[in-house]
Amino acid sequence: MSTTLQNAFLGSLIADAAAMPVHWYYDTQALDRDYPEFSIYTAPKNPHPDSILWRSKYNPGNRKADILHDQARYWGKRGVHYHQFLPAGGNTLNYRLAIELYRLILDRGRYQPEEWLDTYTQLMTDPQWSQDTYVEEYHRAFFDRWSKGTPLKDCGIDDLHIGGIATVPALLAGLFSIGKTDTNCWIRIVRAHVALTHKNSFTLDASEALARILIEIAAGKVLDHSLEAHGKAWGNPLQFQTWSKQKDRMIVGRQLTPACYLPDSFSASLYLAWKYQSDFKSGIIANALCGGDNCHRGAVVGSILGALNSLPGDWLQGLLAKNRVHGEIVV
């Protein structure tokens, strides 16, 4: 499997950082207006025309559940960009967590869910760790439950969002890096890990499907074969071939919702990965320009394209997280 799974992980980080400034844009005319020369790694701009922070709420029961910290002042206001303080090339919250998961596995030489839950809670409750303004619903629900005495292992919720699989490429890269070779064991670990926060069956099935597709690509299988074997519930190459005759925004935007909800978000991700399977740069940009939950679709699009292609050196250089992960990865 050489460096394929590590490249897949890095590809997911690149896809997230690329999409970050246009994350959750649903008005694509506004996206084109605000970022007319979109290419790669741009700092976000305020105001964000589609921001829902003005109606987003989080009222932790006690200080133990405070995961917004100083960012709480921006909740309830209109036009606030979800990632307003992230610099160009920066990663959003779920991918920051993916990086720390990868580091934990390498540093400890193992994956243990209890160790990850301890790390997760320490990071999220540290006011200095993240400057990302938006915190997804599943994080809020998890910490609200924890603050009320629910054991960490039981704080996950029935969440149907593609953000739940953002750590899968990091988990696979970590397991491979410490010499784990039983891929059936990997699948069990992936499902159990995702279930710590996301207990929805669609989310768990999508996480397994992504893991199996990446494992097969790393073993030398072509993408069409992997999709036929593990992605049929979400789409297939024959269907994708028909869709490819239309513009991307006609598929991811009309045929399929560009939003975060499964199963559409996973189908959209697989489609974009299939269409651009031999062109990493074009696929990453296409995913970003479709708007919606493009950052979390990037876990799929970026990892598959990263597994199939060499990573562009300039894009890797501009990824701010490279100093946290790249020293452990030879690409």
Image (cartoon, grey):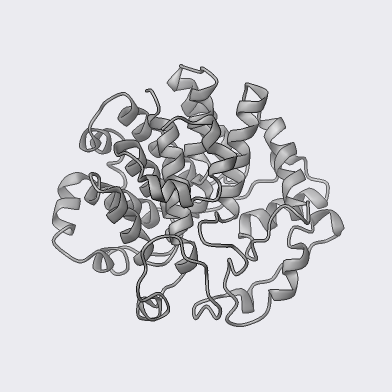
Depth order, front residue of 317/277? 317
Q: Position of residue 288 (x, y in %)?
A: 38, 62
What residue is drawn where x is 35% and y is 80%? 29
Q: How many marks?
A: 0
Depth order, front residue of 242/33? 33
Q: Is residue 213 left or right of residue 12?
A: left
What residue is drawn where x is 20% and y is 52%? 240
Depth order, front residue of 276/331? 331
Q: Is residue 63 visible?
A: yes
Determine whether 229 is above or below 48 in the image.
above
Depth order, front residue of 96/210? 96
Q: Position of residue 197 (x, y in %)?
A: 62, 45
Q: Is residue 221 left or right of residue 202?
A: left
Determine whether 58 is above or below 98 in the image.
below
Quadrant into which the N terminus falls: top left
What residue is drawn where x is 34% and y is 34%? 213
Q: Position of residue 281 (x, y in %)?
A: 31, 52
What residue is drawn where x is 67% and y is 24%? 108
Q: Position of residue 194 (x, y in %)?
A: 56, 40
Determine whether 28 is above or below 184 in the image.
below
Q: Is residue 242 left or right of residue 57?
A: left
Q: Is residue 277 left or right of residue 291?
A: left
Quadrant into which the C terminus falls: top left
Q: Is residue 191 visible?
A: no
Determine whether 157 is above or below 245 in the image.
above
